[in-house]
Structures are given as C-alpha cells and as structure tokens.
Image (cartoon, rainbow, N blue to C red):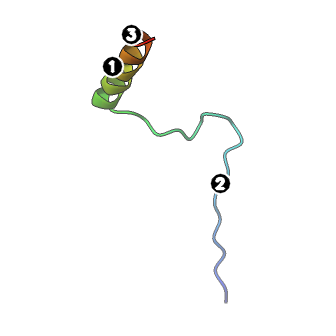
Amino acid sequence: MTRTNLRAISIVPDHNKAHLSKGQKAFNTLIAYFGERDR
C-alpha cells in the first residue's frame, strides 16, 4: 500500500510568513533608519 503525503497549501497572502523575534524586528528597524539617513 502506498502512503499519500498531504500538505495544506496556503492561498492567503502573508499567512505563512515566519514570525520575527524582537531582536530581528529591532535590527530591521535600525537598518531602515540608517537607510533613510543616508539618502
């Protein structure tokens, strides 16, 4: 007997995005700040 592999496929945009840690969000905020400052 063969076993089927069932996977749910998300159609909703941004539904399966990885959650960022507090440190990653702070890092992204700093990068955005320095990017704006250098313009």
Residue linked to disc 2: 8
Q: Which mark is residue 30?
A: 1
Residue drawn 47% across the image and 40% down it: 18
The reply to whether callout 2 and callout 1 are in contact (CB within 8 Å) is: no
Foreground label between 2 and 3: 3
Amino acid carrying mark 3 in the image: Arg
Q: Residue at 33%, 32% (x, y): give it.
A: 21
Q: Position of residue 17 (x, y in %)?
A: 53, 38
Please, is residue 6 above or below residue 2 in the view?
above
Q: Secondary structure at mark 2?
A: loop
22 vs 38: above or below: below
| Residue at image location 28% in from the left, 29% down from the top | 23
- The local secondary structure at tag 1 comes to helix
Provide the residue designation for mark 3: 37
Cβ atoms under marks 2 and 3 closer than 8 Å: no
Spot occupied by residue 22 in the image (x, y as percentages of width and height): 30, 27
Rounded to the nearest whole Å, what is the CA distance between mark 2 and mark 3?
Answer: 43 Å
Residue sitting nearer the eye, 31 or 26? 31
Please give left or right for residue 12 compared with residue 27 in the image: right
Distance of label 2 from label 1 (alpha carbons): 36 Å
Mark positioned earlier in the residue sequence (2 or 3):
2
Give the side of residue 35 with respect to residue 4, left or right.
left
Local crowd at mark 3 within 10 Å, few (<14), some, or many (≥20)? few
Q: In the image, what residue type sits under mark 2?
A: Ala
Location of residue 16 (image quadrant): top right
